[in-house]
Amino acid sequence: MSVAKIMTIAGSDSGGGAGIQADLKTIAALGGYGTSVITALTAQNTLSVTKIHEVPLDMIKAQYETIMEDIGADAIKIGMLSSAAIIKTVAKLLQHQSAPNVVIDPVMVSKSGAQLLQEEAIEALISELMPHCTLLTPNIPEVEKLVGFTVTADEDIRRAAMLLKDKGVSASLIKGGHLKRPNIINTLFDGSSFHMYTTTRLDDTYTHGTGCTLSSAIATFLGMNKPINEAVESGIQFVSEGIKEGYLVGNGTNPLNHMHKLLQYHRMS
Ligand code: PXL
């Protein structure tokens, strides 16, 4: 049978809730075939990140090229990149093999507060990587760093999305979870029009891995040839359901359930 091939270029979360582990579970749960280019290892649980080890640049390149030479990719999700050198390496790889459907989650800080992208790498993210991006999925603190102004009102969100487009991003999904509003409003700018997705704010106990899961779900749907607005809507729904069925794992921010679509099987066992 044929299957959508989805590559994740991201960091490993040893605690299993975010990063590569969240991506591969999400891709599999949605019926895609996941491959991975690991950029960094984190020693991490639901409470904190205790250590980060970056993968050497030539090994990042080798993972990408080896996958592409044989398997290929219908979509690529990009998460934690850690340093400017890794960003430049990944940008060069994308440029060389003009990849389709590139979803970039501009990961900067983990839920537990660890710095996953060095501050001085933000400039490289903007200039080197954003021009390759089909969809960028920043949260509010991330978009503020990328555009350089405070984002609170709807008009700030629209202004930020248009500025991101000027910087080379085809489309952006600005996630409104950090804004102090009763509901969460996520705003998609598809390059010409705005689409708003309003969801109920759920208990934030089960939110470790939500950003990674959302971007890999959207990449999977794009790889399956869904139009961008449907991919985003289905991705948001997938994350909301995952939070509702979250796992009682660890003593910090618990992971969402990436496998909630398979609960019918779990409940039979
Ligand atoms: O949520 C951002 C993120 C991305 N990548 C890795 C992470 C996290 C958050 O914990 O661990 C590897």
Image (cartoon, grey):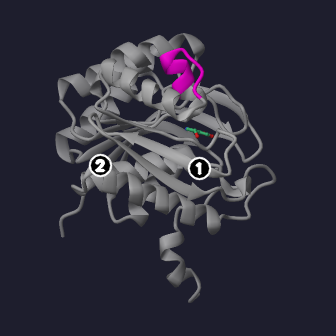
Q: Residue at x 37, y 16 (%)?
A: 88
Label 2, residues with CA under 10 Å away: few <14, some 14-19, many ≥20: some
Residue in the picture at 55% in, 35% down? 139
In what quadrant of the picture does the N terminus appear?
Answer: bottom left
Give the quadrant of the C terminus: bottom right
Closer to viewer: mark 1 or mark 2 = 1
CB within 8 Å, label 1 to label 2: no
Q: Position of residue 172 (x, y in %)?
A: 38, 35
Residue 58 on the magenta span: no
Give the magenta part as a residue range: 143-151
Label 1 to label 2, Cα distance in Å?
20 Å
Q: Amino acid at mark 2?
A: Ile
First along the sequence among labels 1 and 2? 1
Q: Residue at x 28, y 34 (%)?
A: 191
Q: How many marks?
A: 2
Q: Position of residue 212 (x, y in %)?
A: 51, 45
What label sits on residue 228 in the rendered view?
2
Specify the quadrant of the image occupied by residue 242.
Answer: bottom right
**What label sits on residue 79 in the rendered view?**
none
Task: Give residue 184's mark.
Answer: 1
Expressed as whole percent of the image width and height from the top left, the position of residue 23 reads: 46, 50
